[in-house]
Amino acid sequence: MSNLDRQAAMTVCGGRGFVVAEPVRELLSPRKVRLGESTEVRRLLPNLGRRMVGAWAFVDHYGPDDIADEPGMQVPPHPHMGLQTVSWLHEGEVLHRDSTGSLETIRPRELGLMTSGRAISHSEESPRQHARFLHGAQLWVALPDEHRHVEPHFQHHADLPQVTAPGLTATVILGSLDGAASPGTTYTPIVGADLALAAGTETSLPLEPDFEYAVLSMSGEAHVDGVPVLPGSMLYLGCGRTELPLRALSDAGLMLLGGEPFEEELVMWWNFIGRSNEEIAQARSDWMGGGRFGEVKGYDGAPLPAPELPPVPLKPRGRVR
C-alpha cells in the first residue's frame, strides 16, 4: 500500500537512540489518513516520538469498512525502494500487481510479501467482485544496508505456521515465535504474528529480551500487560521482556510486532526508504521520469505522481554502531 499523503513529511528513523531499553507501556494513538475515495486508514508508525519497532517502519490499520456498494481499495501504481511491504487481511481481498509481473489475490490470513530492494512499483485494488467488508493492516519492514539493493521480488504464502494455547491461535507472519517460523524471507531478526484470542482467555506469549515489541489491536477488547488496547491503537512495549501477558474481554484480534532494534538511521519519505536526502530526491526523479521502477501492467488507470519534496530536508545524524 502506498503513502498517498500529498504533503508527505520526511522522517529520520532508526538508530538505537530512539529505542527504549527496558519494558514500558506506551500507548500510541493513530493519525487518520485518506487512501482514495473510500478507504481511510489509521497510521500508527511513524508516530510522534516513535518511529520504528525493530525493522518495522510503517503501520496502517484499516477497516472494517463496508464496501458492498463501493470500489473498495484503489491504489494506483506507485514506487517503493529500500523496504518490504507486508499485506495482512482479516476480511476481504486485495489484488496485487507489480512491475516484476506478479499478479496475486491476497485473502484473509495469507501473507503478501513484496521486497522492493533497489526499485519496484505495484498497485493494490479490491477485485471488481469483492466481499462486503475490508479489514486489514499494511506494514513496511526496512531493509538493512547490505540487502537494500537486492533484486525486487514478491512472495505469497497461503499456509503459515501457528502457535496454539487454550483460547489463543498465533499465526506467524514473519520471523519466528515460540519455535514456529514463517516461510517469508527476512533480512533482520524480526517477528510478526497475528493473535486470535477467545473471550475470557488469559495467557502469555514467550518473547525475546533483546527484541523491542509493540502490539496493534485489530478488533475486540483485550488487555496487553494490563493495558486496555482498543482497535486501531498500538501499545509500544520496549525491550527486556521474556513474556507478554494477554487477557481478552471479548473475542479479540491483535498483531504482535517486534525485532532487534534497527542499528542504522534512515531517511523515509513518501514510499521510499534511503540513507540520504540525495537518494530520496533521485528516487523521486527516477519515478517521475520512468524506467527504474518498471511498469505495472494490467492496471486500469494512471500511475500515482510523487508529491513535492519538502523545502527543508532532514539530515540523519549518521549510523549508530
Image (tube, rainbow, N blue to C red):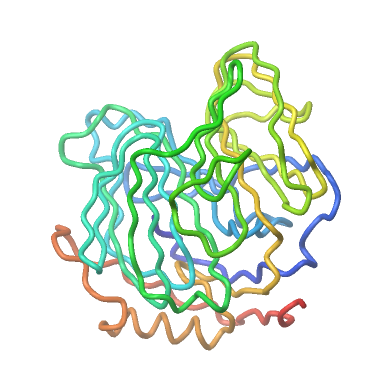
Residue for point 77% across, 43% down: 26
Going by the picture, which residue comes out furthest to the front?
179
Going by the picture, which residue comes out furthest to the top?
200
> In which image quadrant can residue 199 be found?
top right
Residue for point 77% across, 66% down: 16
Left/right placement of residue 294 relative to residue 41 reads left
> In which image quadrant can residue 276 be found?
bottom right
| Quadrant the C terminus occupies | bottom right
Q: How many marks?
A: 0
Q: Position of residue 118 (x, y in %)?
A: 41, 78
Residue for point 24% across, 36% down: 70
Q: Is residue 175 above or below residue 271?
A: above
Going by the picture, which residue comes out furthest to the right?
22
Q: Is residue 27 above or below residue 153?
A: above
Q: Is residue 285 above or below residue 107?
A: below
Q: Position of residue 1 (x, y in %)?
A: 39, 55
Closer-to-camera residue (128/182): 182
Residue for point 56% across, 15% down: 198
Q: Position of residue 176 (x, y in %)?
A: 57, 46
Left/right placement of residue 311 relative to residue 226 reads left
Q: Position of residue 21 (x, y in %)?
A: 84, 55
